[in-house]
Amino acid sequence: MYRLFQTHEIRKSREIEGLWNLEAGDYRGVITVPSCWEMLPSLATWQGKGIYTRELTFGGNARLIFKGVSHTADVYVDDRHIARHYNAYTPFDAVVCVPQGKHVIRVEVDNSFSEDSVLHIPNDYYTYGGIIRPVVLEELGDCYVSTIHFTPFYQDGEWHATVETTVVSLTERETTLELGLYLDDERFSAGEICLSGKGEKVFRQEYTFGDVLPYSPGEPKLYALKAVLSKDGRPVDDLIDRVGFREIRTEGKKLLLNGSPLRLRGFNRHEDYNVFGNAVPVQALMRDLALIRDTGANAIRTSHYPNDELFLDLCDFFGLMVWEEAHARGLNAVHMANPNFLPQSLNCIDEMIGNHYNHPCIFCWGILNECVSETEFGRECYGALFERIRSLDGSRPVTSATCREGRDITLDLQDIVSVNTYPVWGSRYAPADEKMKDLKKWIGETGNGEKPFIISEIGAGAVYGFRSDTQCHWSEEYQAFCLEKQLEATLSDPDISAVFIWQFCDIRVDDESHWKQRPKSQNNKGVVDEFRRKKLGYRVVKEMFAKYSET
Ligand code: ADA
């Protein structure tokens, strides 16, 4: 299962799930796709190459879509190299034309660290290996719809949307087709399109939808948007997505959804589920969302990379608002000076926005968590990435979570100011409300006090089951104490538009670098542990979210 709904009624498409052959280290055997190879006992710590193969019967124009390979992939069909891709957390595809028959797909995967990889580095989360998200095989005709981007807006008392459909031709022949667009099976547009040869063409138009229902966290109404290509009256290709009618804007300090102030309380969440690693099955995604919703949360930050589309589909469905983040955590000046930094970051942004554009749950795009934002060079990098995002999507605000209080010189480049801060966790005597005052004072001094303000991280660590009468660090009692103080100070502050707890669940961290100092080689700031067992802090969060749910 790679989406919550059917994406094609006409195009032939199937998921290449189940068993693939894998050779990695000393291992020669099979593995399920999707999954990460750390789930196999002999590869629990394997960092290096893994070769996946699978024989399949297909032919004609075949499009292979990989939703996520961690972290570098070389893809071959019958020994012909068809794609190279870097970054575990964004999808990529390749089209090949082959005769009908048996073919071997080979994917060479690498999860090792090197100069070639700027975004995957030894970090406070683990870089797992393997084909971690679904693989899809599509059999195409001469032309197909590659994307359909939907941008809703409200004007003169009515909902409108700009719809941008990209059609790809795989033939040199001139082709005339009809493009029909449907909302919940009702056709709202039909027109002839002419493709003069190989390549892609974009069709962009504005439409009025009148009295459709808006999308909001309380009533997350979704519509099916469908593009159908027909030739001589016969349907030849289609693409279906789900959309919602909602507008996100910032106005002074306010974050607005359809004109009403949005106050968000939620979690940072890493995709990590004990032995499943970052290949989290849909049942476990659902379990995470059930727990998150049980606390009363209404928002999630996909720290620190784009998430699996199935997860975003579920967030759309439940009306949980999402800060989706391009991949990067804690890069230093050397990482950012690496010539791969910019191309790898821009590519991640292109693929994140290109693929996740329609999700109504996504309320903002984030970049470069706690990276170098205090130097002129760092500022240039932030500027380049924000510019790229805005060129791809002008409908959502942009932000970046900083920990450089008093030093960050990129706040003016952002629509929302977001700060990671851990008052009380550092010292039980440091009041959290004083910290909020200091932060607001500093933001005001930088001239950015009239923008929405988000606490993108607060939290504290606890080792599950470790209890202490003295409420010492790493005990569940101390985590609960910190969360109560931090949440009281932030949720009660009307100047703070959103609060994201660090973090939802405990996660594995790199075990070779200085991160191994963390107890259990885990980041233990989850309110549930790696098996989703609730710590004392979970109940505190639930109480505090309930206390401030109406504000
Ligand atoms: C930072 C960072 C997180 C995590 C956290 C922590 O704020 O953004 O990724 O490392 O600190 O637990 O220390």
Image (cartoon, rainbow, N blue to C red):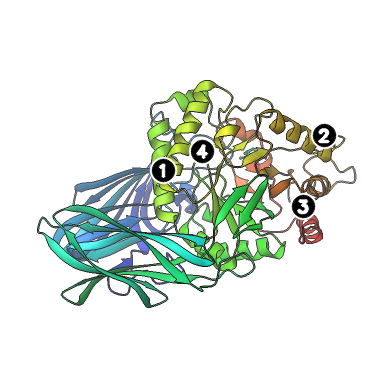
Residue bearing mark 2: 427
Residue beneath disc 4: 328
Q: Is mark 3 within 8 Å of ligand 1?
A: no
- Say which of marks 3 and 2 sits in front: 2
Q: Of the residues under marks 1 and 3, which one precedes in the sequence?
A: 1
Measured from the top left, where is residue 478 in percent x and y? 82, 45
Is the C-beta of the residue carrying label 2 under 8 Å from the nearest atom of ligand 1?
no
Q: Is residue 505 at all visible to an observer of this figure?
A: no
Alpha carbon separation for disc pair 1 and 2: 43 Å
Label 3, residues with CA under 10 Å away: few <14, some 14-19, many ≥20: some
Q: Which mark is residue 465?
A: 3
Q: In the visual, does 398 lie left or right of 148?
A: right
Answer with mark 1 or mark 4, whichever residue precedes in sequence: 4
Task: Look at mark 1 in the image and give the residue it sits on.
Answer: 391
Residue 115 locus on image (x, y percent): 41, 28
In the rendered structure, which disc, 1 or 2, sits on the residue that comes first in sequence?
1
Mark 1 to mark 4 CA distance (whole Å): 20 Å
| Residue 89, image x, y percentages | 45, 48
Amino acid type, callout 2: Ser
Quadrant for the C terminus in the image: bottom right
Q: CA distance from mark 1 to mark 3?
A: 48 Å
How far across and down, in percent of the image, does residue 332 sit? 54, 26
- Indicate which disc residue 118 carries: none
Q: How many C-alpha atoms fall within 10 Å of the one at disc 4: few (<14), some, or many (≥20)?
A: many
Of pointers 3 and 4, the one earlier in the residue sequence: 4
Q: Is label 1 in contact with label 3 (beta carbons under 8 Å)? A: no
Residue count near mark 1 (Cα–Cα under 10 Å), binned few <14, some 14–19, many ≥20: few
**Along the line of sight, the residue nearer the viewer: 218 or 309:** 218
Q: Residue at x 13, y 54 (%)?
A: 197
Q: Amino acid at mark 4?
A: Ala
